[in-house]
Amino acid sequence: MTASTDLPPLDGPPPVDASLQGLDLLTVADFTERQLHNVLTLARWLKAVRRAGRPHRFMAERSLAMIFEKASLRTRCTFEVGMTQLGGHAIDLASEHERLGVRETVPDIARNLERWVDVIMARVHSHATVTTLAEYASIPVINGLSDLTHPCQAVGDLMTIYEHRGHLRGLQLAFVGDGFNVAHSLLLAAGTLGLQLFVATPAGYEPQPEVVARARALGTKTGAEITLGHDPREAVTQADVIYTDAWVSMGQEEEVARRLQVFPPFQVNTELLALAAPDALVMHCLPAHRGEEVTDEVLDGPQSVVFDQAENRLHAQKAILVSLVGVAAEATA
Ligand code: CP
Ligand code: NVA
């Protein structure tokens, strides 16, 4: 990890941005440039605190309700472990809610949960479900992946790039593959922070125009350079980061045959990687479909940081939780 000399003292108070308290995190663009930078600093501070073995029970007596309409390894595990490390408690409601709104309405679920817990994290099929939860719950709601975005992933990814490069600005990022939720989050992160991002997808699998427009609108203030195209080679040439995601996302299973015909030219393999900067980072949100969007050789190779990304989901989400919910009185007493 990059030296943490730029971090506030580990024995001092957590560097929490008070302007984030009470906000929802439905897309990365819910945070301003400054707020996102502050969450990243807190995430690196919390990681250093954890590594130093220092107690950080900033969510003592606080509870998180977790809803999963879709499968998860990383999100499920890192939110629960994160709450444990922060001295709080996480409740997995997956068994009750395979698809929200069947047993009772989404607004009613929100109005129940807000009476008991301090924050909700939901992984949903439709982004509208997480916005409805946020509309009806007075407590913060965190999007743990929807069909629109995956903001927690983007925060962990930015942290990972920062650790490996020591900065974010000026780096050339390439996303190769499906212009879906993970690509959308990277676009919004690039717009918010003023990054250079080239997204290369097959024709017909481009990111949603509204998301691209939002990223570019954010970028007019921050200086982001957002480029779309259909040539993976053009996207990765001299890139500092190559990012890919599954060709078939959860919920798209009926499209498998078609997608497996269309996407092979977008595989991240040694030939494609050779076009990037010699020390380019290879990134993937995971789970990987080895031999499809990425080869074993590249995923397990020296330039891959995919398990750093997975680890950093833990620290990034701890920072998001503490920022949105606030530091428990017990922790500051
Ligand atoms: N990257 C990610 O969100 O992983 P899970 O689907 O396992 O949670
Ligand atoms: N695009 C993938 C991301 C999984 C973390 C999906 O939605 O299934």
Image (spheres, rainbow, N blue to C red):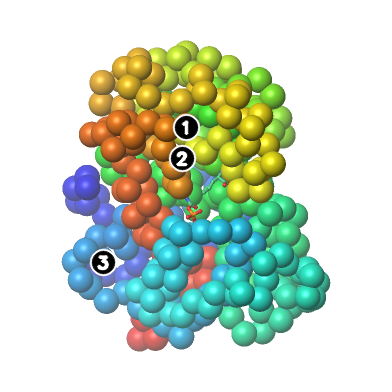
**Label 2 with label 1: CB-CB less than 8 Å:** yes
Q: Is residue 149 left or right of residue 194?
A: right
Quote the CA–CA distance across marks 1 and 3.
Answer: 36 Å
Q: Amino acid at mark 3?
A: Arg
Return the residue nearer the eye: 133 or 224: 133
The residue shown at (60%, 71%) is: 94
Q: Quadrant of residue 16?
A: bottom left
Q: Which residue is mark 1?
A: 292
Return the residue nearer the eye: 85 or 188: 85
Q: Amino acid at mark 1?
A: Glu
Q: Position of residue 154 (x, y in %)?
A: 48, 46
Determine whether the residue tagged by mark 1 lies in a helix, strand or loop.
loop
The residue shown at (61%, 48%) is: 250
Regarding residue 289, the answer to whether it shows in the image is: yes
Q: Position of residue 244 (x, y in %)?
A: 47, 34
Quote the CA–CA distance across marks 2 and 3.
Answer: 32 Å
Q: Is residue 289 left or right of residue 304?
A: right
The quarter in which the C terminus is drawn is bottom left
Q: Which residue is mark 2?
A: 289
**Label 2 with label 3: CB-CB less than 8 Å:** no
- The 10 Å Cα crowd at callout 2, few under 14, some 14 to 19, many 20 or more, is some
